[in-house]
Image (cartoon, grey):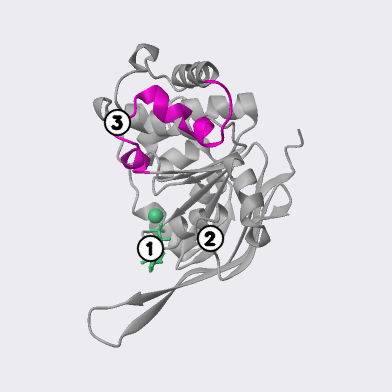
Amino acid sequence: MKPSQPLLEVRNLNKIYVQHRWFPGKRFQVKALDNVSLMIPQGSTLALVGESGSGKSTLAKCCTMLEEPDSGEIYFEGNNLAIMSQQELRRRRPQLQLIFQDAATAFNPRFSAAEIIAEPLVIQRRGSDGERRKRALELMEQTGLPVEAAGRLASEFSGGQRQRLAIARALTLEPKCLILDEALSGLDLPIQRQIVRLLLELQARASLTYLFISHDLGLMAQIADKVAVMHQGKIVEERTPADLFSKPQHAHTQALLAAMPVLENRTTAGGA
Ligand code: ADP
Ligand code: MG
């Protein structure tokens, strides 16, 4: 394991969306990504913050090639995903998992918790029924879900538990990198802390790499090695959380910090 080796690196990513407005003949171009470059060493966490519409989700989707950039390179373990064949991409994608805020809405409502967690193994045709079930139970335990609830439907779990299910499912294929796009937003603070603790434990155990997208600077201070600030499709600043809080450089970062007065209470969470 080489901690300084970049696991995920994007170079000069550009993405323009064409938006159609209600009045006829009018089209607008939105530069969602404007020459974005970033690098995440293996086993570390980069937090990405920025106001709504600044391009964070577009970047997350491009990193996993769910969305194709107009130009630029996306290196995962040194291989450029942007020019990879579909077949090769399918082979590598399990290593790089994206978790959305509303990930649980995509669950099959007729599936039990264990089936939801084991499904990626079924899709990849890995393991026997028994082995898949064992892995699902293992992951439930790891993510702090009650193992005795393995047969319950996802809709019968609380919001926090459903998000744990989404995380457990994302871990099924033993990814090297998780991209969490507002994945903890909307959850109660104690649940967020528990999940953050879990993510840190997993990182310590398996050297997981995180791209952690959040508009919550307090949460990010607990988890990030570096913070990148996004504004209008550009990364305008990238620094350690301590540096960002003590001497924000960019006017936009200062505005973001000023808009978030709850920090003191959040950083005393005792590591999660
Ligand atoms: P964030 O996640 O930071 O809120 P997004 O990446 O979702 O920002 O969006 C960046 C910009 O791109 C916004 O102006 C948004 O309206 C636009 N956008 C995102 N996805 C699409 C799409 N599929 N079609 C058109 N415009 C989009
Ligand atoms: Mg978003």
Q: Earlier in the sequence, mark 1 or mark 3?
A: 1
Residue drawn at the location 46% of the way across and 57% of the way down: 56
- Does the magenta portion include 120? yes
Check the image and report above or below for 85 versus 202: below
Is residue 268 visible from the viewing direction of this image?
no
Element assignment for label 1: loop
Which of labels 3 and 2 is toward the front? 3
Which of labels 1 and 3 is toward the front? 3
Residue 234: image location, x then y, percent: 52, 66
| Residue 84 vs residue 33, the one in the foreground | 84
The magenta segment: 101-128
Question: Which residue is tagged 3?
Answer: 110
- Ligand 1 within 8 Å, label 1 CB: yes
Q: Which mark is residue 249?
A: 2
Query: How many neighbours does mark 1 have within 10 angstroms: few (below 14), some (14-19), or many (20 or more)?
Result: some
Check the image and report above or below for 46 versus 58: above
